[in-house]
Image (tube, rainbow, N blue to C red):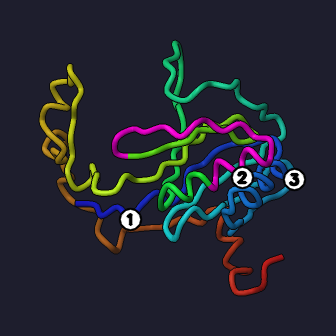
Amino acid sequence: MIHYTGIHHLAMATGDMDATIRFWRDLLGMRLVAGLGRPGYRHYFFEISGHDMIAFFEWPDVAKGDLKDHGVPVKGPFMFDHVSFEVAGDDDLWEMKDRLEASDIWASEVMDHGFIHSIYTFDPNNIPIEFSAPVADVDVRCHPVNVNSLPTDIAREGPEPHPEAWPQPVQPTPPAQRTVYPGEGRALLTEIRTPYR
């Protein structure tokens, strides 16, 4: 079984990296930990936690998406509704709400979702964001629950993975045949031990 350790990074797009840095690094407090680029392209990574990051590609022809409220159904092609960042508790949630509003950025009321308390906002690229604080003694990871009144047949199978639903590898790739090809991020290796510039 594969062992997941978290979300390494979410990859978003922006047409304005400076506004994106100001929001994610300076307002939200997420460190800018890696930057790649050349004319017409940038790829910057912001640290969410010790395991998780959010990254932005800056492409010159990217325009902001239309504002789409969190969780509201849409029709037609669609891939992404919103991203939720967990904060340690309600005090952090209220601090975030106060910081957003002090910066004249809309923030929703605090919502009680039973297992989390949340606020909602948008970044400068109109990306819908949620900040969620866990509710004490309510952990759906430890105690999965599905209260959907009409779950799908597959959902009724329960919370645990059913790997037999997919074909399994007949022969794993032998170590001698595992090739890792160079990518853009290799440029970071020459700078990794030098001060930030």
- Asked if residue 104 lies in the magenta stretch, the reply is yes
Residue 58: x, y in percent? 77, 47
Name the element at disc 1: loop
Look at mark 3 in the image and give the residue it sits on: 39
Q: Amino acid at mark 2?
A: Arg
The extreme top residue here reads 75
State which mark lies toward you, 1 or 2. Answer: 2
- Rendered residue at 69%/81% (across/down): 192
- Rendered residue at 84%/76% (across/down): 197
Q: Residues within 10 Å of mark 2 (few under 14, many from 20)?
A: some
Q: Amino acid at mark 1?
A: Thr
| Nearer-N-terminus badge (3/1) | 1
Q: Which residues are magenta?
A: 95-115
Question: Left or right: where does residue 73 sit relative to residue 150?
Answer: right
- Rendered residue at 56%/41% (across/down): 119
Name the element at disc 2: helix
Depth check: give the residue in front, 25 or 80.
Answer: 25
Look at mark 1 in the image and give the residue it sits on: 5
Look at mark 2 in the image and give the residue it sits on: 99
Q: How many numbered marks does the figure carry?
A: 3
Q: Residues within 10 Å of mark 3 (few under 14, many from 20)?
A: few
Q: Amino acid at mark 3?
A: Pro
